Every structure is written in structure tokens, then in C-alpha cells.
Image (cartoon, helix red, strand yellow):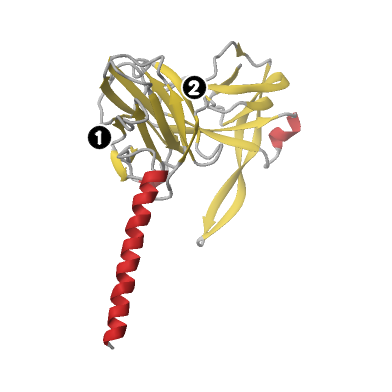
Amino acid sequence: MKRMTVAIVIGLLFVAGFTKLDRVYSQKFFDVTGRAQWIWARHQMSRGIPVAFFAVRDFELPANRYYTRIKVAGDPEYTLYFNGREVGGRRFGEVGDALDVFDVTQLAKTGHNRIVIAARSTNGVGGVIASLDLSPETENYIVTDANWKIFRTWDAALPVSDVGAAEHPMMLGEPPVGRWNYLRTAPGKPEMTISRVVQPREELSFITRMPEVKVISGVAVLGSERVRATAYDFGEIGDGRAQLTIGYDSRQSRQIQVRFANVRQELFTLEGDIRPFVFAAGEKTVIDPEVRHFRYVMVYGGQARAEVVR
């Protein structure tokens, strides 16, 4: 009996020791954001409503810097601004679950600097994590933590200065937490220069059907609903990013459903490339972070006008 007790104790000590070693080496080799925490706007995620907001951090940089790099991930979608310039962004999972690395050395200044991360979620669920490095030896000079500010309303001046009331972020925890493990790093997708804005050659308004999922007695049932839509025809199939503009100032986050198509018949089918776009309060224009191949952009409900940026 004593031998069994001793064996159990030794086994427990071995498991505890192994767990500690695994945690230490996982932290060493896989955690590249240090003390950074996943943050989000204070929000009841179970409500399932669209949410868009802007996470902001002002800070001072020393004169002696080897480089200035930002590591960032935003689930499900983010756009990064640094010192007033849009740097890049993407939808989470485009190239796998990765932490994007942006070299912003040319934009960094000795003294005051500012990071703004726009986050968007169709159902209000998500997370943002970021850190800023100055050299290989001094990683994580700035990290996402309780010192960040959350703004829910967009203003053109927000990338350079505070506008309106700020809130404290909701802290979700350090990696690995929730559905996120340690993220691998990948080169960030830089913001593409807009050379021209293409106007549609024709607008088509009509009644169509849109896929709809209803929960009946606890079972999800796929159906459809009858809606009005406007399709914008750009005359030929080509590559570009949709630019959506609404003609009013919404006081809360809202979602607009958009379909991309190459032939007119695709506009009237239930199957197709339907994507949601989330506008923040005060935001009138949103540009798709992805380059797509299409001729038509169809907006369900006619709630926005579509153009193409190339």
C-alpha cells in the first residue's frame, strides 16, 4: 500500500514537472506577443449582433531603435493604422491563423506615436491582439492591455487624435486562450495603393431571394427570404476591391450583405459568393480588404452604393 502511495506521488510530481516544462518551453518558442492580451470592446457577445470599433494606443518611442515592427491579429477582421496612415489588414483565416508582421520603421517617430486598429465582427464575437517591437532583444515594447482605449464611432481624424468618448477594453486573456492558440507569424498584407475608382456602368434593381437560416425546435433549417437588391454592373470581369458607401450616418454598427458574381444569372440564385460588410457608427465608406475577381456587385436591401477600387 505504501509502495502504491509512493508511486502515485511520484507520478503526480512527474506530471506537474512535465506540465511546467511544457508551459515554459511553449512560452519560449511559440508565444511571440509576450504580455499582450486579446482585447475586445465591452459587449454581450451572446447577442449575436454586428460590432465594429477602434482600439487605440498612444505611446512614446525612444531615439535608439533597431527597427519598429507591429505584430497584430484581429479575429474576424481588422485594419491597422499607424501615425495616421492605413498600413494593412485582412480577414482572419485568409492564410491560416497567423499574426501579421508589419515593418513601420519609416513611419515611426522619436517621441509620440499612435496605433489604431479597426475591428469588425458580423456577430459581435472576436478578439484583437498586438505588440510592437524595437529590436530582436527588446520585443513587445507596446502590447495590447488595459491601457488601450476603445472608440465606437468613426471619425476621419481618429487615426491621429482622439475624437469622442473612449471606453476601457474588455480583457480576454493572454495566449493561448479561448479558441486561439499561439499564433505563427506571417508577413502582413500591406495596404494597396488606390490608383483609380471605377464607377458602375449600369445599376439593376430587382426582387430576389437570399439564403436564411431559421432555428425550428432547436434544429437549424436552411430556407430563403424575399428581398430587394441592387446589382452594380462594371461591364467586364476584372480584379479589384469593392468600395461600399452608405448615404446616412448610422449611430450604431450595422451589417450589409453583398454578393459578387461574374454572370448575370448568378444574381438570382441562392448559391453564390455572399459576404457581409460591417460599418461602424459614423462610418459611411468601407473597402473590402480582399482583391476579388468579378463583374457584378449586388447589395441586398439596396442599403449601399458599390464602386471598385483598383
Instruction: Identify the element where label 2 is drawn.
Output: loop
> In x, y percent, where is residue 305?
56, 21
52 relative to 220 in the view: left or right: left
Measured along the vertical axis of the image, is residue 107 above or below residue 302?
above
Left or right for 120, reference 214 = left
Residue plotted at (35% across, 66% down): 15
Q: Name the kind of residue labelled 1 in the image.
A: His
Residue 125 position in % (x across, y down):
41, 43
At label 1, counting other C-alpha atoms closer than 10 Å, the crowd grade (few under 14, some 14-19, many 20 or more) is some
Q: Quadrant of the C terminus?
A: top right
Could you say which quadrant of the image residue 273 lies in? Answer: top right
Q: As rendered, which of 250 and 153 lies closer to the eye?
A: 153
Task: Judge whether 165 appears above or below 77 on screen.
Answer: above
Residue 200: x percent and y percent? Answer: 65, 16
Q: Mark on residue 168?
A: 1
Of the 4 image quadrants, the one containing the N terminus is: bottom left
Which numbered marker is on residue 246?
A: 2
In the foreground, 134 or 289: 134
Q: Is residue 177 visible?
A: no
Where, by quadrant of the figure, is residue 38 drawn? top left
- What residue do we see at 33% from left, 37% from top? 41
Q: Which x, y percent locates residue 157?
A: 34, 15
- Answer with the quarter of the image where residue 226 lies: top right
- Which residue lies most toward the top here? 195
